[in-house]
Image (cartoon, helix red, strand yellow):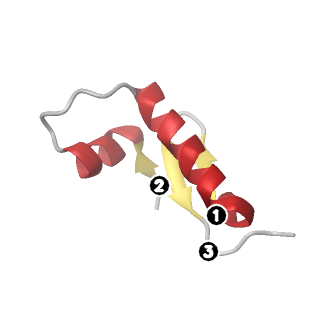
Amino acid sequence: MVFTRYQIMDLLHGGDYVVTDRAIDVQITYLRKKLGPRRDYIETVRGVGYRFRDRVEA
């Protein structure tokens, strides 16, 4: 399942909060840094948003 940037914004901040698409991208970057070796579990779907991967290929 792919989550669009708008879905992520709505889930995190609610419908009344103004956030740009780029702000979500930056937050995903910070989240990946915190995940360290597990960062590849968040996959970018270009032009759409993000999804979680079940497993990461070595």
Between disc 3 and disc 1, whose residue precedes?
1
Count of numbered circles on the image: 3
Amino acid beneath label 1:
Tyr
Amino acid beneath label 2:
Val
Q: Residue at x 26, y 52 (%)?
A: 11
Left or right relative to 12: residue 56: right
Between disc 2 and disc 1, whose residue precedes?
2
Which residue is the extreme one toward the left? 16
Q: Which residue is mark 3?
A: 54
User: Mark number for residue 2?
Assistant: 2
User: Mark number for residue 41?
Assistant: 1
Rate crowding at label 1 as few (under 14), some (14 to 19) or many (20 or more) other CA atoms within 10 Å: some
At mark 3, the secondary structure is loop
* For the residues bearing labels 2 and 1, Cβ distance under 8 angstroms: no
Q: CA distance from mark 2 to mark 1?
A: 13 Å
Horizontal and vertical percent position of residue 38? 68, 66
Q: Residue at x 70, y 60 (%)?
A: 36
Rate crowding at label 2 as few (under 14), some (14 to 19) or many (20 or more) other CA atoms within 10 Å: few
Q: Quadrant of the C terminus?
A: bottom right
